[in-house]
Image: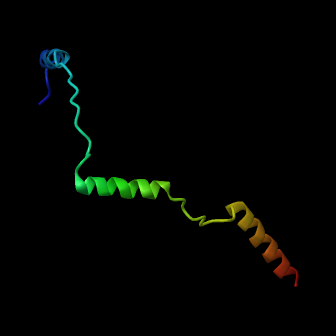
Amino acid sequence: MGHTKEQAAANFADFQRTIPSLDIVPGHAKIPENEAADLAAKEGAASIPPALHKFSYASLKRYAKTQSLSAAQL
């Protein structure tokens, strides 16, 4: 069941008459659970993550190649 061109044109005309509105919704200020979540998020964002990888992939690959060549020469 497809729409006819007339139905599509009427729907489009209705859409064009739609007036957009913008509603301002207050944030989650002064709600205890959300205040705690905000504080935890801010603390987490401010903390410096530990350096998990001190070596680049390329340097590790180079090291592995050097080690395997050294072992092959023995």
Q: Is residue 49 left or right of residue 10?
A: right
Q: Going 75% across and 72% down the picture, which residue do you hit?
A: 64
Q: Residue at x 74, y 63 (%)?
A: 59
Report x, y in % for residue 27: 26, 42
Using the rendered view, name the quadrant where residue 52 is placed: bottom right
> Who is closer to the viewer here, 19 or 43?
43
Residue 5 lies, in percent from the top left, at: 16, 17
Name the one closer to the observer, 30 or 42. Answer: 30
The image position of residue 53, as x and y in percent, is: 63, 65
Q: Colour scheme used in the picture?
A: rainbow
24 relative position to 58: left or right? left
State how many labels appear: 0
Q: Residue furthest front?
A: 30
Residue that protrudes farthest toward the bottom in the picture: 74
Position of residue 31 relative to residue 60, above or below, is above
- Residue 24, x across and y down, in percent: 23, 32
Quarter of the C terminus within the rendering = bottom right
* Residue 22 image-quadrant placement: top left
Residue 62 against residue 29 in the figure, above or below: below
* On-image quarter of the N terminus: top left
